[in-house]
Amino acid sequence: MTARKSAQQSDSVTAVTGTPTTPATSRGWVSFVGSGPGDPGLLTVRAVDLLRSADVVVTEIPEHEQLVRTVLGLAEDAGEDDGAPRFVDGGFGTDGQPLTHAGRAKVVVKEAKGGGHVVRLLAGDPFLYASGPEEAQACTKAQLGFEIVPGVTSATAVPAYAGIPLTSKRHREVAVVSCADKVDWRDYAGKHTLVLLSGVSSLGDTATALVEAGRSPQTPVAITRVGTTTEQQTVVTTLESAAADARTARIAPPAIIVVGDVVDLRETLSWFETKPLFGWRVLVPRTKEQAGSLSARLRGYGAIPEEVPTISVEPPRNPQQMDKAVRGLVEGRYEWIAFTSVNAVKAVREKFEEYGLDARAFSGLKIAAVGDKTAAAIAAWGLRADLVPETEQSAAGLLEAWPEYDDVLDPINRVFLPRADIATETLVAGLVEKGWECDDVTAYRTVRATPPPAPTREAIKTGKFDAVVFTSSSTVRNLVGIAGKPHPSTIIAVIGPATAKTAEEHGLRVDVLAQVPDVDVLVDGLADFGASRRAAMLEAGEPVTKPSDRKPSSRRRASSK
């Protein structure tokens, strides 16, 4: 057991804050943790803390391992040496068959007896229609300590994401029913709201039984599949039509069914499925390191981002130029260092670490950053940028804000400019005009990535993506080079005029142009486009569709201006 995790087995005490620590045991400790209904953001703070300290995570469904990696920020290939817990499948046995409650309990007890901290991750809440009680009893029998961490149950979360309150001023009674059990539907003949779990396959029989028990055939029903995720789909119907409408919509488990008048409130309270990019499949052609924040913002607007690396960042072919520049920086050769990208900051930082240097080597040196994201990367290094453009955050904006060389105020007239091998010469030429001498150094290379899998290439060409966001001219060139041109139905969003020009040169019409070259502004612009498109459809009385639902017959051409 690692020292980092041994704190979970410390003596049982209560901290000043009143939060109890995990009791000690030489035989291990089990935390039964509810994973919620699917959205990683619905995990409790306590759940995330326990996952960070876990030696072993016993999963229940295939999606659980990826959920843990997502919330802990672990790479897909990160192993135990990288700080990842060991994952054990608690859903299926070695024969590939689903485990019974007793079978899962045996897995948990076996892992806990090996010592260390075991997190048993259960879908929803451990004590609501789950195997948590049986597994906890098995721990008691084996004299193993355990704790219960409630999770957000799908019985309440999914209706909330569908815009359906389970109670209102006029409706105060709710019953949660598992259709996997034998149910006497005469017990639910009243007008109280019903939340049905595991009920899709038996929906026809259930609806018939409720009508026979006295419910009106016109009682509103909502069926929501894969709730709280960006693939959520809700069908609103009535008891008499529920089974047929579910088949037509191809509703399959997992799904939550709500029966009752509260379903009518969805018309005004639907908030999740009405997000401007809800359900849009958006292609993100960037480096893996850069795609995270952009994808997270897209998810916030309801989109389903798919990251396809088109650029690989690699060291320069000849590192001697960088070595010489870094030595010059330490020796006080420069007055300024100008960072024009986050990758440039990363490249210099890696070179510093290679030499055993740290941020103290920047003492007396002025630092410029092309924009806020680059300035944030500098700040993460413990440094502060002295110059960041206030208006246009680009090389041109940085040049406009750069001071003229003054031989009285500036003891040194030299600038260190670490950049990509494909960067433009505009900044260098402008600085020279202002009296500065530049050491224009290739700090890293951007090369074309390997082509994406065949299904992704096919989706790009046939319009299965609703939008693509281009963050540089090179992403346009490289995507077309490795995967082909996006289909004319795909919405094209670009980060700036130069990228727009490149897109048009490749025969693509630009639909969204960011007002400033910033990825957050780019995504916000795409969301505004989606919202306007949705509003126009509703105003015209048309059903709301995604761009991929409509595929023009003619190829899109660059618009003339």
Image (spheres, rainbow, N blue to C red):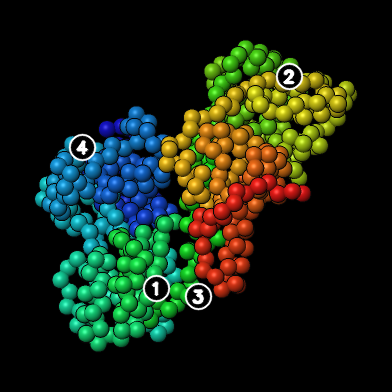
Q: Secondary structure at mark 1?
A: strand
The residue to which callout 2 is attached is: 439
Q: Secondary structure at mark 2?
A: strand
| Sequence-earlier tag: 1 or 3 | 1
The amino acid at mark 1 is Val
Mark 1 and mark 3 residues within 8 Å of each other at the beta carbon: no
The reply, left or right, for residue 83 in relation to residue 1 is right
The residue to which callout 1 is attached is: 236
The amino acid at mark 4 is Gly
The reply, left or right, for residue 278 in relation to residue 70 is right
Mark 4 burial class by Cα count in 10 Å: few <14, some 14-19, many 20+: some
Mark 1 burial class by Cα count in 10 Å: few <14, some 14-19, many 20+: some
Query: In the depicted view, which residue is nearer to us: 171 or 357?
Result: 171
Of the two numbered discs 2 and 3 in the rendering, the one whose residue sits closer to the viewer: 3
The residue to which callout 4 is attached is: 115
Q: Give the Cα separation between the discs numbered 1 and 2.
A: 65 Å
Q: Give the Cα separation between the discs numbered 4 and 3.
A: 52 Å
Q: Give the Cα separation between the discs numbered 2 and 3.
A: 61 Å
